[in-house]
Image: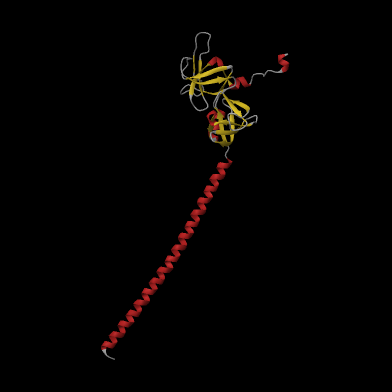
Amino acid sequence: ISVNELLSGEKISMENNNQKNEQLLLDMAKELEKKNKTIWSSMWAIMIISITALAIMSITAFAQEKRMAVVQTSTCYMRLQPDYESALETQSLMGTIVEIVGEEGYWRQVVTPEPYTAWCTNLGLVEMTPEQINEYKAAPKYICTSHHSGVYSSPSVKSERLSDLSMGNLLRVAFTEGKKTTPSVTKGAKGEKGWAEVILPDGRKGWTPACDLERFETWAQKPKPSEAGII
């Protein structure tokens, strides 16, 4: 065997080995690619399942959470249908808490404490979160004991009128800044009560003649008129 033949045989052998190595590397790369695809597919599946589960939980929680609101006008007219020409079903006074059970445009279907189910516009309501409703319930309140009164921007009937008031309206008590137990009031002339600062359902503050208000807890403890008492 000549040297050239030996060299030629060695070259062929090296080429065969190189081809085998290249094929082995290609096979390994394909296998790795398959594994990566499997891993990414599994990760995407887990992510999709997690996101779907969170969405379902959020929707369920939202569906279970009641929509609550507080009447913000002195008298809120409740109608049988979401239409101004619909029959008047009942009315609710400022400060009343209602549950929103439906809506159509700017109309809201509510359930009152009595309970009545009727429609009113969203302008007559202040929608609140459950936390805000709890804070509202716990807040000390005034009740309007005058047939007609009003809430003014400052303690003067000459100032801007923020809202009218009717008998039975509820307003939160505004306290003196830095004193959580001292109601914010102004002294009137001799023999007069002056003015009391109040908080409307939408959070605005104003002033009402103190003679038109009474602390709700005091008023609630008073004996109620009865037929026997009238006779």
Residue closest to the eye, 192 or 164 = 164
Outermost residue toward the bottom?
1
- Vertical side of 41 occupied by 64: above or below: above
Outermost residue toward the top?
190
Q: State the quadrant of the C terminus.
A: top right
Residue 111: x percent and y percent?
62, 32
Image quadrant assignment for residue 131: top right
- Vertical side of 218 occupied by 131: above or below: below
Outermost residue toward the front?
85
Residue 79: x percent and y percent?
61, 29
**Residue beneath the point at 50% across and 57% down:** 45
- Vertical side of 31 occupied by 3: above or below: below
Q: How many numbered marks does the figure carry? A: 0
Colour scheme: secondary structure
Image quadrant assignment for residue 117: top right
**Residue beneath the point at 52% across and 48% down:** 55
- Vertical side of 154 occupied by 41: above or below: below
Q: State the quadrant of the N terminus.
A: bottom left
Residue 148: x percent and y percent?
56, 17
Residue closest to the eye, 220 or 100 = 100
Residue 83: x percent and y percent?
58, 31
Q: Is residue 22 left or right of residue 134?
A: left
Q: Is residue 80 left or right of residue 207?
A: right
Residue closest to the eye, 201 or 188 = 201
Outermost residue toward the left?
3
